[in-house]
Amino acid sequence: MDTSALQDLLSRLVGQLVHGCGNVACRECMCDTGRRNVSPHKPIRKYTPRSARAIALALAGGALPRKHLCLHYSPAASDTDPDQDDSEALEGPQDPSSFEQLLCDTPSIRDLCNPKAKLSLRPTKLEYWKQSLNPLLQPIAIEDDVPSSLVSNKRAADIVYNALKACLDIVPEGTLAQYSYADAWIRDGGAYPTGNLTTPTDEIWLGVLDSFERGQDLLSRVCEAVAIRVDLEERLQILRSRLNGAAVKVVRPTLVQMMVKKFGLDLSATVQAVVWLKKTLMLHWNGKPSVPQASTATGALILLKLIKQLAWHDLPNEVSAWFSLPAIANNLAVVDVANSWIANSPKDKSDRERSFDSTRALRMTQEQNSPHPPSDADAVFEQQLLSSDYLFNAAQRALYFRMVNHLKMRKAHSKAEKAAALRRHLPAHSPEYEPDDQVKHEEEHYLLLNVSRTDVLQDAYDQLWQRRSGELFRPLRVRLGEVDELEVGHDLGGVQIEFFNLICKEAFAEHKGLFATNEITGLSYFRVGSLQPLHMFELLGLLLALAVYNGITLPFSLPNAFYKLLLGDRDLSLDDLADHWPEEAKSLRYIMGTPGAEEDFEFSFPIEANGVRIFAYEPLACCIESDELNTIRVAKAVPTTYPSTEIDVESLQWPGFHFICPDGSEIPSVTAADKERYSSSYVSWLAIDSVAPQLRAFQRGFHRVVDKHSLSIFLTPTNLKAFMEGSTHLDIDELRKSTHYDGYDPMSKYIATFWRVVKSWPEEKQKQLLKFVTAAERVPLGGPGQLTFVVQRAQPISAEYLPTSSTCFGALQLPQYPNARVLEEKLSLAIEYGLEGFGTG
């Protein structure tokens, strides 16, 4: 049914419902006259025009929309009767809580039910920009260079931006609360907003949604044009690199750069754009963890990212709330997201670049506009939704990361099982041909570590040294105890936490010389000038990666720069120094913000360790991935104890460093023109260059277990830090919600008394209880529910016994005491005795 036919049908239905046909022979139940003829002696409700529009819409959407048309009704007759005028006075009061009434009062529905209205569902302005986008949606033939028919990026940016503005111009002005209410319909993907939202008393929010429908076709085309152009630029870049024999470099697409220059939306338009683009994303999303790279959904993601980068400081309240879209995560299976991320490994990307040629480029461009999907051999490359930082929160990313690791564990476990099964089917052999330990390791289902409490770090090092990579990907199991008593604490989960607690306690101790802790900030970082061999840092990186891989939260605090570097981002700024090097960051900000402040500084960079204070020239480019020694060009070196003593710089033996003395050239002073370079070099010196060998060794060990691609699920240093370090805050109410019970009724008075006692304690003591039961010193990302905490009825039942715990199972064996005072006394005593070990193992 076309628009004019629909308008005719609805207007006739509304007319007969409100005015009737006036024929005494009418018996149509959907005609005012027919209703009165059928029941002449009963009171009949008079439909308001609003009610009639609602009924007409329902009838038109049914299987037989013309079934209830009155044969006697004539629209012309009703138009001549002034009493039948469809005026506002006949509408009656509106119920703002009724969605149907609000919908039927929108201009679009009113016009659709009015035979005199001239329908213009796509206004002329929208139609104009829709046509203007056509050149950006056409297939482009790529040969050896940019085609002459290609619209320039400047012109493309003009078209896209103006088309976007045309869309936003039809959205009615409203308050942020009204936009937020409209956003709630889209954000949660439901039929009605969730949460404690108060329905606005007017229908502006509904008008916003109505305008979205009227302009949706144009905005969808805008998003599609952006995605196609960005994808085209990427393919042109790859092609040029192949032709020039140069490596492919990832740069921001030129179209986006042009749009950055043009972007100038006010606050209201920015909010409208964010809400509408989220709706467009949901409308065109394929329901999978990834979307085709040149699709409308990808274009919506690109524009949302652009707005988030440029306008985040203008948006009120939490910026993340405006960009959140929980419906995406709610409709994705965790295992599907993990499998998709694994499949999208860097190896696949490099394969794409190696196989890319001009013929392939042309075929890909044509496929974008083809109504027929490409074959498996010509699969369209896709963008992972996880690569958008606003679609998933940190807890969801942690869940996907754990699933990625679980799938790798399952694969490694299965490989070991197959190896063991294969050997079982081999013919029997004599004892002297028994396979050696390495062969047996290949058949182990788990990565087993037997370590003593007295020398946990050395034992772990000894057993991990030269382990094959395949073994490291198996699930970890730890046996922890005293020397010659390693059967104590067989690992079923909790022992791993205790093991890594001991590892961190020893590795971060000052006397070990691996890390230094800032007494003011409480953060630790690689010790400058550490004399420990580099393999110690490599094995420590491997150990901590095993903790991350097995989902263990670690009890240390490292600066933001550490996590940024671990993610492979070396573009450090002053903001990255603020948490661990606050004084240096403050001084550099002063230099950058105060004219003339740089005059007292020169391009020398200090390093003080092992009784020597060195002033180095500006560092040369340092490659973290290289195994070469880090060369320090020394301008001056003095001892910290006897300043007059000469230092033979080139004889210094610091692991990973090579000190040289250049020809004695002067250290250049910092000028106004190069103080930005000085600031950048100083930031790099503190976080990278002064500890480059240690950082390089640590990352080499860490990435043996957790590769950069898996780690990039977290996207930001903040997310990664939250996962690795957890939280030092414990919400006791959340712990209670996630607690399981064995032998106790969770609704019993005794359990209520237990939690009342625990809740009365200070937080530090509550965390001691958590450690006593689970061995965890931190709360994992996602809350206490990520830990196993069981309150178990102790056997035998006696008030004389202290509570005990089994950290292997996360269980608290709690006797039933006669009153709250005894309960608190016994539990406090048990926690005090058990702080440095297991309750029962």
Image (spheres, rainbow, N blue to C red):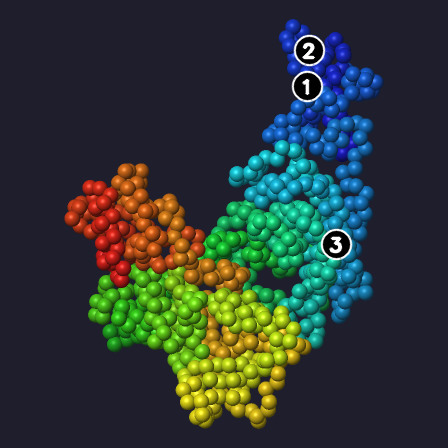
> Left or right: where does residue 498 sit relative to residue 97?
left
- Secondary element at tag 2: helix
Between residues 164 and 816, which one lies in front from this camera angle? Answer: 816
Residue type of the residue flagged with mark 2: Arg
- Secondary element at tag 1: loop
Residue 47's tag is: 1
Point out residue 483 in the picture as x, y percentages from the top left corner. Answer: 22, 70
Mark 1 and mark 3: Cα distance apart in space: 46 Å
- Secondary element at tag 3: helix
> Residue at left 43%, top 68%?
520
Residue type of the residue flagged with mark 3: Val
Determine which residue is flagged by label 3: 160
Q: Quadrant of residue 516?
A: bottom left
**Eye-nearest disc, 2 or 1:** 1
> Left or right: where does residue 429 sit relative to residue 1?
left
**Eye-nearest disc, 2 or 3:** 3
**Dot 2: few (<14), some (14–19), or many (≥20) neighbours within 10 Å?**
many
Residue 36's tag is: 2
500 vs 512: above or below: above
Between residues 561 and 115, which one lies in front from this camera angle? Answer: 561
Mark 2 and mark 1: Cα distance apart in space: 12 Å
Residue type of the residue flagged with mark 1: Tyr
